[in-house]
Amino acid sequence: MIARPQSNLLAATLAEQGTTILSVWSDRLKKSGALASGRIREAELQTQCRTVLDLLTPAVKDGVDAAQPAFAPLRDFLADLSRSRAVQGFTPSETATFVFSLKQPLFEAVSGTKGADPTDVMRTTWDVTQLVDALGLQTIETFQKSREETIIRQQREIAELSTPVVKLWDGVLALPLIGTLDSQRTQVVMENLLESIVSESAEIAIIDITGVPTVDTLTAQHLLKTVSAARLMGADCIISGIRPQIAQTMVHLGVELNVVSKATLADAFALALKRVGRTVVAVKARELPAS
Amino acid sequence: MAPVTSDRMEVRSSDDVVRVRQQVRARALEVGLSLVDQTKIVTAASELARNMLDYGGGGVATIEVVSDGIRRGLRLVFDDQGPGIADIQLALKDGFTSGGGLGLGLGGAKRLCNEFSIDSKPGEGTRVTCARWK
């Protein structure tokens, strides 16, 4: 964008009245309760305000288009600020208000300039509006993005946390599934299970679905795929934890899991031990320690 | 027979299918359906919502608590503006799928409900209504 005369008024205003704008702005922020939540200290807020003005002053010399390279340091600073506020638990409006509240001090400073042409003041006011809006919107966007990143990261963590493969005995693995079994999680589950089958040279894998609230045809299909893959690796699967209501529903759905299934994990474990040639017996009374 | 409560939910992603399922479960509890009936209607909702997402390009699920004066029940309506179903009888047949599924969802959902109807015109979309009574 070519330098326009009206932005010179803004640049001049910022250069001359920077200190006044800063104090008016931080006063307004304080009055609007920016510190009330206690998530940010006064000195910190003051530094943030000063940095924004310090970065804004040189940037407006060549125009007020916030997408220009001259605004890059300011954009980066605001992005960092909104990211850190997202983490600190500020609401999106609190974060955006920080930027939008700059409008009034700027308006006042621009219109208070002595000897300025009224048309110039009008145009500069409009420029300030557009500029602050653009910066404010960008802050919200970054805020949103960092929230989304947090959510995606948590989803990944949950997916990993909820699909552990547990070794119950030599050659016997258990895979307790908890939550919804969607395509993405099935992939994680399958990978974990197949890797553990190799590393533990497992013969039997027990897939426990006690924690799966709904078994529909897609879930069933995912289970069947996992079972088939395990079979190809030389391990037999037992499905356990099918609750009565799920069993009835599956029968109505017409889903057939052509795999050995048991009502509880304990039953499945007993069967698995039998298959690997072990058995669990009660310790006889006389063999118990005397005390 | 006006619904007692009505929830309208957009289904645009597989997360929405989970949310529909949770809402149906909450409403089924409210109606007082037994655990088996709850599971049945929730599973049916899951099948129908996913069908709507996979084959109808997403749509709107409406969950209504209905009462005929004596009994209470749950009615689910799934509306999409997708390509529609050319042959409903074939679509209901077990093992038939136009995607990569097991081909049991639609027929299975019908068996899981007390009332079930499909209204579809090729090119105009599909409306599946199902209900489970206490």
Image: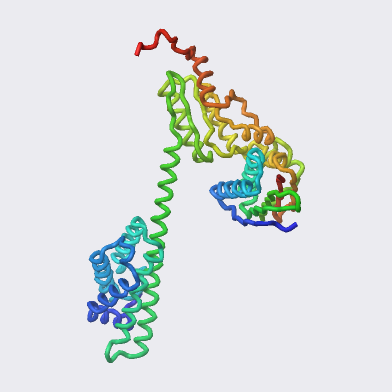
Residue A97 image offset from top left, x and y in percent = 37, 69
Find residue A254 and report its image quarter: top right
The quadrant where residue A144 appears: bottom left
**Quadrant (top left, top right, bottom left, bottom right) of the C terminus of chain A:** top left
Q: Residue furthest top?
A: A286
**Percent position (x, y) of residue B124?**
71, 56
Foreground residue among A242 and A253:
A242
Q: Residue at x 41, y 22 (%)?
A: A200
Please provide percent x and percent y for residue B79: 67, 54
Residue A252 rendering spot, x and y as whole percentages? 69, 35
Identify the residue at horizontal 31%, vertical 79% (top origin). A105
Q: Is A250 situated left or right of A201 in this image?
A: right
> Is residue A224 visible from the viewing direction of this image?
no
Which residue is depicted at the point 58% across and 37% down? Answer: A219
Is B119 rendered above or below residue A76? above
In the displayed structure image, the side of residue A207 where residue A166 appears, left or right: left
